[in-house]
Every structure is written in structure tokens, then in C-alpha cells.
Image (tube, helix red, strand yellow):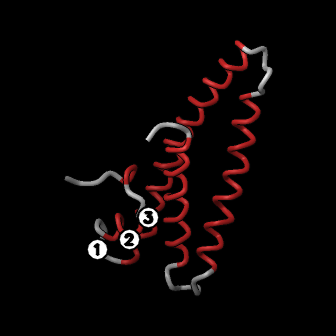
Amino acid sequence: MTQSIATTDDPLAWCWDRVSTRPGLAPCLGNLLREAEGRLAAELAEAEREAAELDRVTDNRYENIRHIRESDTRWRAYRDAECDRQSAAMSSGTGSGDVLLACRVTLTNARIRQLGKP
């Protein structure tokens, strides 16, 4: 059975299994990141709908929608900083760009799970 990228924690290995040359890695990882970002946008929209409903029934007492949006902003800053760190730890030309993309896919998939849906 083929494992879906949504359930794997190693997008770099997932792409290596599907491309025949190293230059194929970046496009594969880029596609995975776009796919993950699309799933994240859908999950975030659902989380915002749920938060808005909670705000409605509680007269906005807990400011759920504000917290969701603030969490997303801070999470994105963390993801980008962490992936930049991982990429910078490698020398230029050694796959640092691939590591950057793979890290963003991995952390984006983890965020989707954090929002409540695998």
C-alpha cells in the first residue's frame, strides 16, 4: 500500500522514492508544499468557522477567532524560522533548499493535525 504524503513525516524520502534524479526533488517538494498549504487553508477555515460559532454563542467572551488567527500568525513565524535554521545548517549546494521545503511540508502537515484533523 502506498503511503500518502498527508500521513508521512518524511517528505524528502517520499519524493526520493518518486523521482529519478536529484533535480526532480525540488519540484516534487514544491508540489507537496502547495498541497499541504491547501489542506492547511481548508482546516484553518473550518477552525475559524467553529471559533466564530463559539464567539457567537458566548458573546465573544473568549475571543476564539482572534486566538485562532494569532496562533496561525505565530505558528507561521515559527515554521519559517525553524525551517530556515535547518536549511542554514547545511552548506549551500548540499540540498539546503530541499531541506527547507521538506521541513515546511513536515511542519505544515503537523499543524493540520494540531488543528484537529489528520
User: Tag 2: Cα neighbours inside 10 Å, few (<14), some, or many (≥20)?
Assistant: few
Q: Nearer the viewer, residue 54 or 97?
A: 54
Image mark for residue 20: 1
What amino acid does circle 3 point to?
Pro
Contact, mark 2 vs mark 1 (Cβ under 8 Å): yes
Q: Quadrant of the C terminus?
A: top left
- Element type where label 2 sits in the image: helix
User: Tag 1: Cα neighbours inside 10 Å, few (<14), some, or many (≥20)?
Assistant: few
Q: Nearer the viewer, residue 50 or 17?
A: 50
Q: CA distance from mark 3 to mark 1?
A: 12 Å
Indicate the position of residue 55 as horizontal and vertical percent values.
72, 19
Which residue is located at x 28 percent, y 74 percent? 20
| Residue wearing tag 2 | 24
Contact, mark 3 vs mark 2 (Cβ under 8 Å): yes
What amino acid does circle 1 point to?
Ser
User: Tag 3: Cα neighbours inside 10 Å, few (<14), some, or many (≥20)?
Assistant: some
Position above or below: 8 against 15: above
| Residue wearing tag 3 | 27
Image mark for residue 101: none
Position above or below: 5 against 71: below
Which residue is located at x 49 percent, y 72 percent? 98
